[in-house]
Image: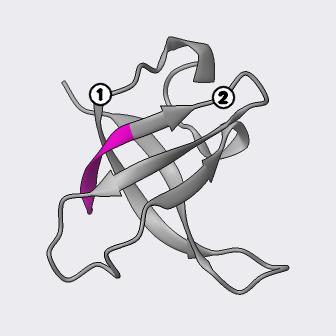
Amino acid sequence: MPQGSIKTLTDRGFGFIVPEDETSTGKDLFFHRSNVDGVDFNALRQGQRVSYELGTDERRGTPIAIHVQPLP
């Protein structure tokens, strides 16, 4: 699973991840609170390392992070 760090979290229930993989597009990945697994969205913190899977936003066709999980 790809890994990255949380760059931004909003009080509106979404955030952005900075991917660690050099093969990524170089862009931050959007994720929604409904795509967080294992913990509550409010338990996440900026700078926290996470794993995720790549998905596609159905409306925009852009890459997003799904199955976001904090790393130990």
Which tag, 2 or 1, sits closer to the chain's start?
Answer: 2
Callout 2 crowding tier (Cα within 10 Å): few <14, some 14–19, many ≥20: few
What residue type is disc 2 on? Answer: Thr
Q: Nearer the viewer, mark 2 or mark 1?
A: 2
| Main SS of residues in magenta | strand
At a point 72% along the width and 41% down the height, the residue shown is 34
* Residue annotated with mark 1: 48
Image height of 13 relative to 35, above or below: above
Callout 1 crowding tier (Cα within 10 Å): few <14, some 14–19, many ≥20: some
Query: SS for tag 2?
Result: loop
Q: Which residues are magenta?
A: 1-6
Q: Residue 29 in the image: x percent, y percent? A: 48, 61
Image height of 60 relative to 16, above or below: below
Q: Residue 9 in the image: x percent, y percent? A: 56, 30
Residue 8 as seen in the image, left or right of residue 42: left
Q: Which mark is residue 10?
A: 2
At a point 79% along the width and 29% down the height, the residue shown is 12
